[in-house]
Image (cartoon, grey):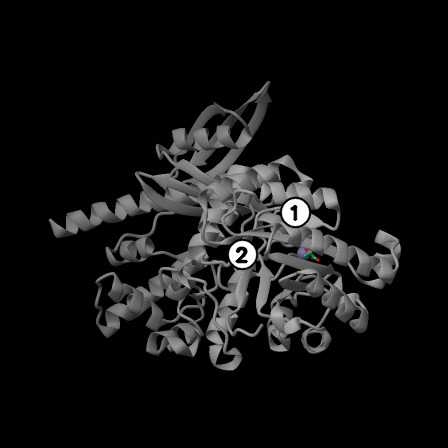
Amino acid sequence: MTTDRIRIFDTTLRDGEQSPGCSMSPQQKLVMARALTELGVDIIETGFAASSQSDREALALIAAELKTPVLATLSRCLPGDIETSVKALETAARPRLHVFLSTSPLHREHKLRMSKEQILESVHTHVRLARSYIDDIEFSAEDATRTELDFLTEVAQVAIAAGATTINLPDTVGFTTPEEIRNMFAHVIANAAGSDKVIFSAHCHNDLGLAVANSLAAIEGGARQVEGSINGIGERAGNCAIEEIVMALKVRNAFYGHDTGIDTRRIVATSQLLQRLVGMPVQRNKAIVGANAFAHESGIHQHGMLRNRNTYEIMRPEDVGWESSQMVLGRHSGRAAVEARLRALGYWLEEEELALVFEQFKALCEQQRVVTDIDLQTLMHGAPVQDGYRLASMTISDVGQRANALVELSDPEGNRVCETASGDGPVDALFAALSAATGVALSLDSYHVHSVGIGADARGEANLSVRHEGEAYEGTGTSRDVIEASALAWLDVANRLLRQRQGSRQAETSNA
Ligand code: KIV
Ligand code: ZN
């Protein structure tokens, strides 16, 4: 079957969920499936119905509500698995049964202990059984990329003859290369009888960081379905990241000539939803959805961007769901970027005035990594930027189920402030004590700690998303000690709020 549209088969809820630290409850899967439907994926693989009650529950919840996407569940080549999966798919408006069996010599010998003939027999029997219940059958030849090409072709041919409608040739261990997988698809499609009646699918893992490149090459070889996951989560190094392959096909449409049904403006929201649901943030420089993907700090880049954004951006941030590009003002920024930001904030400066403010801006960059709008406004109102509260010391102790925190801060005027508080755990107690000491109330939306650097240089970085009077703020703190990093992240936000208050008080006074 030839069609130029690439179907997007999402396996975030199956292969993705199978990866360490990413498990989801049925309710969480439903939330994610709603977002995937909005995003416009064609097929949602909801789980592995025969493997757990939780996967069956998730499928039931999703099938009861979502009628547009095809809903798939994975099944081994076992009659019991197939029957359980068929039952679980009963309420799906558009059910797909996804049957798989390994085909490579390594898997045949060491995992399955089956001969080539036995594999062919099993594929025939189980695909036929599946097809006797459901019309939409996908067959996957697990470890296809390490399978003899002629045998793989025979397997595909048998699966097609038995009733499969999609043939998936996975790179299960992320071993292949673009040229090799392009040839594999082209060979099987050219030689398996009946291949013109089915859709061929690629399912690439990222062990060598090639999952997206290999999926693009599979498309060149004839695949018309790509399997992947949001943020690339999945077994080991993960799967092909849907946001990346979709944007590669869109940005390089003139080269590939294939469309997808994805509403790309929903990509960032879907990615962020998954990050929150599984508690696994993506790295800042992650393509498309990382915080730095559209951020420019260096003076030369900012200057180019201000003249014409195409100089340093190959796609518009708005097209993937970011609000806009971000000009991060910091040590590497030039005068043009500072001037542009000041103008956006309403300050149009003469040459000498700008030179003066730029000097102050540079001085500020020696003290902090990023200069925010509030910092610029404070500079414009002539007030020295306050240092804010500084952490002098902290002591945390456990009392049964509760924890106590004692914090000692120096306030903006240099006075010592001490406060204690208790909480459900060390971080809860710490934040309560900081709140008491600064008079700033923050409600926590999310809190992550991860390590940056390696070996003796490793540091803990804490990232907080908090709310204050309905507004959202982010704070970061880094230290060798993760609790101290958390305190610094909290103070990062509190000090920004205090500067903001100071800035608006001064603005009121100068307007009066
Ligand atoms: O990686 C793989 O081979 C799989 C199959 C079960 C499709 O996930
Ligand atoms: Zn996989």
View quadrant of ligand 1: bottom right
Could you give the CA–CA distance between mark 2 and mark 1, rounded to whole angstroms? 18 Å
Do we see residue 368 in this rendering? no
Quadrant (top left/top right/bottom left/bottom right) for the N terminus: bottom right
Of the numbered discs 2 and 1, the one sitting upstream in the chain is 1
Residue at the image position 52 percent from the left and 71 percent from the top: 248
* Amino acid on which disc 1 is placed: Gln
Q: Quadrant of residue 302?
A: bottom left
| 53, 271: nearer the viewer | 53
Between 85 and 424, the residue placed more toward the observer is: 85
Label placed on residue 18? 1
Is residue 443 shown above or below 38?
above
- Tell me where residue 355 appears, x and y as whole percent: 30, 70
For the residues labelled 2 and 1, say whether their Cβ atoms are less than 8 Å apart.
no
In front here: 101 or 430? 101
Indicate the secondary structure of the residue bearing disc 2.
Answer: strand
Residue at 45% x, 53% y is 68
Looking at the image, residue 352 lies above or below residue 133: below
Residue mark closest to the camera, 2 vs 1 = 2
Q: Which residue is mark 2?
A: 43
Q: Position of residue 65 (x, y in %)?
A: 45, 43
Q: Quick check: 303 left or right of 123?
A: left
Taking the image as shown, residue 8 lies to the left or right of residue 48, namely left
Dot 1 crowding, Cα within 10 Å, few <14, some 14–19, many 20+: many
Figure check: 496 above or below 10: above
Amino acid on which disc 2 is placed? Ile
**x%, y% of residue 457?**
65, 53
Does any portion of residue 182 appear in the rendered image?
yes
Work out whether residue 464 or residue 43 is closer to the camera in this orientation and state it.
Answer: 43
Q: Residue drawn 59% across and 59% down?
A: 228
Residue at the extreme top of the image, as rendered = 400
